[in-house]
């Protein structure tokens, strides 16, 4: 009896379903070609299982939908804003809230306020929109994540950690006054959803305090990071996710949030800060770019759904099932021998395209190619996270990231274990015929965030 395992299961049951459309290989071939071999340009109708992103794609609960009906659509001072403000203060521990239409709205405002031309913004790996807003504000991003994060095979438990020596070297080189803040993400997206440890955050806090540098937290997936701390870090096994989330935030001065991920809503985000002066300026600026400071581009009902979603997102059972499903898929892929980033991250599986397609060099877009092939097999939509996503430097040269990945991002509370089986089997089939796959060339390249709209042709 002792050996019978305790499986996790979803802490909810299903009340409504959305029917999926199945496609034939010929339909998929046509659709992929029309989309310029970019999965972002596929029509969602042509997709069977959609793993493009976990952003805005989660299923809301009955309570969140009930909250939508309680929307107070007053232009100013909506009741839902005050509910959201209270939840952000209580659950996340930040003092002042500015709602925004989504995460990048908050990044825009924050970057404009804190960054001056010539500033340096160190961070634990870049994120596409975050770095672009830092650059558009005149700053330069410097990667200070530990080296292990760039190695898909390295099984370090906290691959999202900051290398404090790298940060100290930057401070020495440029001076603390050139560094407006350290940009820290929990569950580092581009590294494969890898967590940062509490110990590392505390040390970062101590170092930045000494130099009077702020720490700004991209808290888009903070609950998933908290789960890994609970599972892996000494002293946290018996702490609830809620307490861990609050402790993480306590080592930072403010946050940008894309509520479309952890917070279980289809749209929304915010900027939250502890500093009154920054808040004052942000409250002023939000009116220009988003909307009045009590709605920031959102409807009252959106803010209500977000407030309820935040409360649900820090539930221990919720997060265990959420990450449990991701781990289930990852283990299944590994059983088939598919090369993935290890350890398995919080929001998806990241397939190592360099290892999967070693015969395709980075100029021929191995991850972009693989994402297209995965779609062709069974209609599973994934996304490139490699040389296309990395874009170009200010001088026009391509960034060549070490990680060339295809992301299988799992929406929260949407798909079942049987869907995970189908995804793993489809990927294994593509892996079996990997040697016959050829690379691609880019035939159209937009100026900003090219991965969204670039077009390709098969070689
Ligand atoms: N920060 C992180 C870590 C993100 O993953 C995202 C979005 C943002 C900021 C920007 O937020 O989309 O609400 O404006 N990531 C999505 C993704 C797009 O698919 O990973 P947004």
Image (cartoon, rainbow, N blue to C red):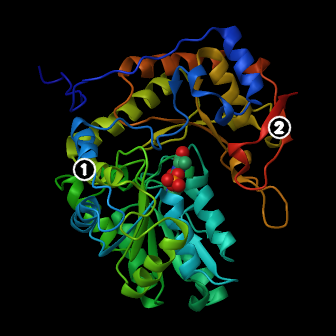
At label 1, counting other C-alpha atoms closer than 10 Å, the crowd grade (few under 14, some 14-19, many 20 or more) is many
Q: Earlier in the sequence, mark 1 or mark 2?
A: 1
Q: Quadrant of residue 140?
A: bottom right
* Depth check, front residue: 153 or 119: 119
Q: Are marks 1 and 2 in contact (CB under 8 Å)?
A: no
The image quadrant of residue 125 is bottom right
Q: Quadrant of the C terminus?
A: top right
Q: Say which of marks 1 and 2 sits in front.
A: 1
Q: CA distance from mark 1 to mark 2?
A: 45 Å
Q: Quadrant of the N terminus?
A: top left
Mark drawn on residue 308: 1
Q: Give the SS element for disc 2.
A: helix
State whether residue 77 is above or below residue 268. below
Task: Indicate yes or no: mark 1 CB to ligand 1 under 8 Å.
Answer: no
The residue nearer to you, when weighing 5 against 126, is: 126
Locate residue 454 relative to residue 16 in the image: left or right: right
Residue 100 place in picture, x, y as percent: 45, 62
Give the residue at mark 2. 364
* Foreground of the two, 292 or 402: 292
Please give the name of the residue rendered at 48% of the width and 48% of the height, measured from the top-left corner: 193
Residue pictured at 34% horizontal, 65% vertical:
198
Q: Is residue 457 left or right of residue 388?
A: right
Alpha-carbon neighbours of circle 2 within 10 Å: few (<14), some, or many (≥20)? some
* Residue at horizontal 32 percent and vertical 60 percent from the top: 74
Q: Position of residue 349 (x, y in %)?
A: 50, 36
């Amino acid at each position: 009896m002792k050996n019978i395992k305790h499986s996790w299961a979803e802490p909810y049951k299903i009340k409504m379903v959305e029917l999926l459309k199945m496609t034939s290989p010929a339909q998929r071939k046509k659709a992929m070609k029309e989309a310029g071999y970019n999965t972002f340009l596929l029509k969602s109708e042509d997709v069977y299982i959609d793993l493009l992103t976990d952003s805005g794609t989660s299923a809301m609960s009955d309570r969140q939908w009930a909250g939508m009906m309680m929307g107070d659509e007053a232009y100013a001072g909506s009741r839902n804003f005050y509910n959201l403000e209270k939840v952000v203060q209580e659950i996340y521990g930040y003092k002042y809230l500015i709602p925004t239409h989504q995460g990048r709205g908050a990044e825009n405002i924050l970057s404009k306020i804190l960054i001056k031309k010539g500033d340096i913004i160190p961070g634990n790996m870049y994120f596409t929109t975050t770095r672009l807003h830092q650059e558009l504000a005149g700053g330069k991003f410097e990667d200070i994540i530990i080296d292990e994060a760039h190695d898909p095979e390295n099984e370090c438990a906290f691959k999202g950690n900051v290398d404090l020596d790298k940060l100290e070297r930057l401070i020495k080189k440029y001076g603390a006054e050139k560094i407006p803040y350290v940009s820290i993400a929990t569950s580092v997206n581009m590294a494969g959803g890898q967590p940062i440890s509490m110990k590392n955050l505390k040390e970062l806090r101590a170092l930045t305090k000494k130099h009077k540098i702020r720490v700004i937290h991209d808290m888009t997936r903070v609950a998933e990071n908290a789960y890994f701390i609970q599972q892996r870090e000494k002293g946290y096994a018996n702490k609830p996710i809620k307490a861990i989330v609050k402790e993480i935030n306590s080592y930072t001065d403010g946050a940008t949030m894309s509520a479309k991920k952890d917070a279980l809503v289809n749209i929304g985000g915010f900027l939250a800060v502890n500093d009154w002066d920054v808040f004052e300026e942000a409250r002023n600026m939000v009116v220009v770019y988003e909307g009045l400071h009590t709605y920031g581009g959102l409807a009252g009902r959106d803010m209500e759904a977000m407030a309820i979603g935040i409360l649900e997102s820090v539930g221990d059972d919720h997060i265990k099932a959420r990450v449990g499903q991701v781990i289930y898929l990852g283990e299944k892929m590994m059983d088939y021998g598919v090369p993935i980033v290890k350890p398995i991250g919080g929001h998806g599986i990241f397939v190592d395209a360099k290892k999967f397609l070693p015969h395709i060099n980075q100029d021929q877009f191995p991850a972009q190619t693989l994402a297209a092939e995965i779609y062709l097999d069974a209609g599973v939509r994934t996304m490139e996270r490699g040389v296309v996503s990395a874009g170009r430097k200010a001088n026009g040269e391509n960034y060549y990231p070490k990680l060339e990945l295809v992301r299988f991002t799992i929406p929260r509370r949407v798909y079942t274990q049987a869907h995970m089986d189908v995804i793993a089997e489809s990927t294994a089939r593509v892996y079996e015929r990997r040697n016959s796959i050829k690379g691609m060339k880019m035939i159209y390249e937009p100026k900003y965030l090219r991965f969204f709209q670039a077009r390709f042709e098969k070689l």
